[in-house]
């Protein structure tokens, strides 16, 4: 278990997640198949080639899910009770097959539950694609709210 208990989150801290993933065509295809999303912009190279992007885009929900997954070990792995919400999701730039994605999380707020036995942690998660010029590009951002165990009440 690598996640943090409620007491270990500090409002204002930014957590740089070390894990990264290069998104493959197979990742995108599998995610679309699993979620029954057959949007041709994600799957049909001829269709996507005629769009402003010129090629298939990685499904934005996969990008968001990947950002969550990359952040879990450093935030809520084994210490979460539940995810309460994902809000204010934005995809300012596209992701393509072969792009490498990493994430960072900023803790924006935290408070105890009314019974004092758990805590609610609010985080802003950002996902970036690595660029060869060193100016990485923001591809997804959102707010995540999690119900977290407190160390003193962990079993």
Image (cartoon, rainbow, N blue to C red):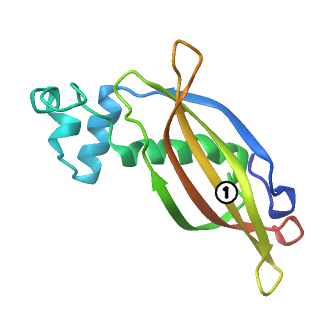
| 28 lies above or below 38 | above
Q: Residue at x 39, y 21 (%)?
A: 98
Where's the C terminus, which quadrant? bottom right
Q: Residue at x 56, y 25 (%)?
A: 136
For residue 135, side relative to residue 7 (left or right): left
Q: In this view of the protein, which residue sits in the foreground, 143 or 66?
A: 143
Identify the residue at the far front of this view: 52
* Residue 141 picture location, percent across and down: 53, 48
For residue 94, side relative to residue 36 (left or right): right
| 121 lies above or below 36 | below
Identify the residue at the far bottom of this view: 115
| 146 lies above or below 27 | below
* Residue 112 picture location, percent across and down: 80, 76
Residue, disc 1: 123
Q: Which image quadrant is residue 58 in?
A: top left
Identify the residue at the far top of this view: 132
Q: Which image quadrant is residue 48 in?
A: top left
Identify the residue at the far right of this view: 152
Q: Which image quadrant is residue 57 in?
A: top left
* Residue 143 picture location, percent across and down: 58, 58
* Residue 81 picture location, percent across and down: 66, 68
Q: Residue at x 73, y 59 (%)?
A: 108
Circle 1 SS class: strand
Q: In this view of the protein, which residue sits in the foreground, 121 or 90?
A: 90
């Amino acid at each position: 278990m690598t996640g943090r208990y409620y007491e270990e989150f500090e409002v204002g801290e930014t957590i740089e997640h070390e894990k990264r993933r290069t998104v493959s065509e197979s990742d995108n295809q599998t995610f679309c198949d699993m979620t029954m999303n057959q949007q041709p912009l994600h799957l049909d190279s001829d269709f996507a080639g005629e769009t402003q992007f010129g090629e298939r885009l990685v499904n934005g929900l996969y990008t968001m899910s990947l950002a969550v997954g990359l952040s879990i070990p450093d935030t809520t792995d084994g210490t979460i009770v539940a995810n309460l919400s994902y809000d204010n999701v934005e995809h300012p730039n596209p992701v393509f097959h072969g792009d490498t994605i990493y994430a960072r999380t900023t803790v924006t707020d935290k408070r105890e539950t009314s019974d004092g036995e758990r805590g609610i942690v609010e985080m802003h998660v950002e996902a970036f694609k690595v660029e060869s010029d060193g100016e990485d590009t923001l591809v997804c951002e959102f707010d995540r709210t999690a119900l977290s165990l407190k160390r003193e009440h962990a079993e």
